[in-house]
Amino acid sequence: MEQASDDALLTQARAGDMEAFAQLVHRHESQVAAVVCGMLGKGEEAEDVGQEVFIRFYQALDRFRGDAKLSTYLVRIAMNLSINALKRRKRHQAVHGAIEEASKVGVTQGSEWDEVVQRSLRTLPAEFRTVVVLRLMEGYDTAETAEMLQLPIGTVLSRLARAQVKLREQLSKYFKS
């Protein structure tokens, strides 16, 4: 039996044929998994990202124009989501490192540290605070943050840099030995 082309399966999937979509997933899942595992290593996080690739693809079925091969499109989604996961991982590790440092100098973990961070955030002007919350706390990338705030990317980067300097000044007293 001859296999249907990606284009034929895409047409069927766009028409609501879930079996056609499942065939596309099956056809491309090993390539997506290889990219994601190469970026993140094997594990639950990689599995979640791999699933998210196909969720995003399903949501974008009608917008996929076919300018690139489907495999190229899926790999691009996999790379972007993997990079986002790495950024989240890095932020997560940085937060845990900061909590450990703070606990060494008397700031306890949990709610007391959360309150210290929240107090420091409240000292920032609103335009800096919104960028910090979206970029560093909620994990949106710079372009998404710029789009949400309807600002140029350069303005987001500038505000983020200035906010980080101010926060570092505010929080530095908790990290002195």
Image: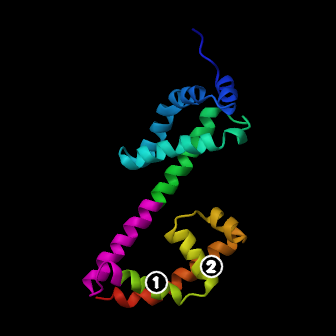
Could you tell me the amino acid type at mark 1? Gln
Q: Which residue is mark 2?
A: 159
Considering every residue shown, the one lying at the far front of the view is 16
Q: Quadrant of the C terminus?
A: bottom left
Q: Residue at x 63, y 72 (%)?
A: 157
Q: Position of residue 159 (x, y in %)?
A: 62, 79
Query: Local crowd at mark 2 within 10 Å, few (<14), some, or many (≥20)?
Result: some
User: What secondary structure is found at the residue carrying circle 1?
Assistant: helix
Q: Is residue 31 above or below residue 162?
A: above
- Residue 90's x, y, as percent? 42, 63
Look at mark 1 in the image and give the residue it sits on: 118
User: Residue 44: x, y in percent?
Assistant: 37, 47
Residue at 69% in and 65% down: 147
Instruction: Read off the magenta span.
Output: 88-112
Query: Which residue is found at the position 40% from the left and 85% from the top?
Result: 115
Q: Is residue 109 magenta?
A: yes
| Residue in the foreground of this view, choosing between 17 and 112 | 17
Q: Quadrant of residue 172?
A: bottom left
Q: Residue 168 in the image: state x and y as whole percent.
A: 46, 84
- Whether residue 74 is in magenta: the answer is no
